[in-house]
């Protein structure tokens, strides 16, 4: 039986923070930590949390179809009080490692929001070097409305970017694999070598 989307379940962390006197809650998430190519993309978003302004269906971006994600991403960006999307490129990932690149992207996303949040919810067990109060939530993209919203706009942005890269580097099928290490992608590397957007630290064995 398919589980019905429940707004109150998704808002438990936000509601707890609102009850403590915080008013502007930012969610932050990343997409693209695992691929062999392309940037890691981080998004931060401050959503209105009034019941009548909630967007139905916001969830972990990986659980949603591409069509649903794209529709929700447009709704999220239109309704958000503020949002930012930040890319950290493959060269930086190679220089400082993917974990630090993700932290850097999240930090920049939070710090470039047009509205300063009172508190930040981050996905996973991630601590960011920011001055704001923060709380990390394991599986936050599925459990927190704000983090889920950030995950959706980050994934839609990155997927479209990889689709554009596929036009320049068609031999790797980026439009399908988004840079992840699928059989077709790995075969492309073996046949054609690495392209400029490949992460050298992720592709040493090739």
Image (cartoon, grey):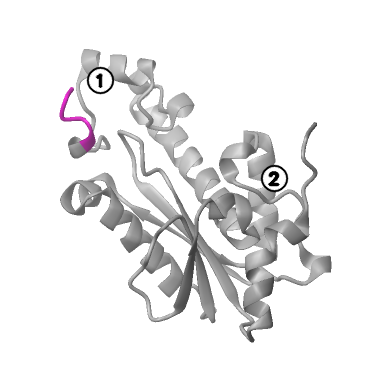
Magenta range is 202-206
Q: Earlier in the sequence, mark 2 or mark 1?
A: 2
Q: Is residue 143 left or right of residue 193?
A: right
Tell me the residue that label 2 is attached to: 71
Image position of 199 with respect to 147: above or below: above
Residue 68 appears at what percent x and percent y?
A: 69, 40
Magenta part, dominant SS: loop
The crowding category of the residue bearing disc 2, from other C-alpha atoms within 10 Å (few below 14, some 14 to 19, many at least 20), is: few
Tell me the residue that label 1 is attached to: 189
Q: Identify which residue, 21 or 203, lies in the foreground.
A: 21
- State the residue at coordinates (69%, 45%): 71
- The kind of secondary structure element at disc 2 is helix
- State the residue at coordinates (37%, 32%): 179
Q: Is residue 92 visible?
A: yes
* Number of callouts: 2
Is residue 79 rendered magenta in the image?
no
Q: Are marks 2 and 1 in contact (CB under 8 Å)?
A: no
Position of the N terminus, as image quadrant, is top right
């Amino acid at each position: 039986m398919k589980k019905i989307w429940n707004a109150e379940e998704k808002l438990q962390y936000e509601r707890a923070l609102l009850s403590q006197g915080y008013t502007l809650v930012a969610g932050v998430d990343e997409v693209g930590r695992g691929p062999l190519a392309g940037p890691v993309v981080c998004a931060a978003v401050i959503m209105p949390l009034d019941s009548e302004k909630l967007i139905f269906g916001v969830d972990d971006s990986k659980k949603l179809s591409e069509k649903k994600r794209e529709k929700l991403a447009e709704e999220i960006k239109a309704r958000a009080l503020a949002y930012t999307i930040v890319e950290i490129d493959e060269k930086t990932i190679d220089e400082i490692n993917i974990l630090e690149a993700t932290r850097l992207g999240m930090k920049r996303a939070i710090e470039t929001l047009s509205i300063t949040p009172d508190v930040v919810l981050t996905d996973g067990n991630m601590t960011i070097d920011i001055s704001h109060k923060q709380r990390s939530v394991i599986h936050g993209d599925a459990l927190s409305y704000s983090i889920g919203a950030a995950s959706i706009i980050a994934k839609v942005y990155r997927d479209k970017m990889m689709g554009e890269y596929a036009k320049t580097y068609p031999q790797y099928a980026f439009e399908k694999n988004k840079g992840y290490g699928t059989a077709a992608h790995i075969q492309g590397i073996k046949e054609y070598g690495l392209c400029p957007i490949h992460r050298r630290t992720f592709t040493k064995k090739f």
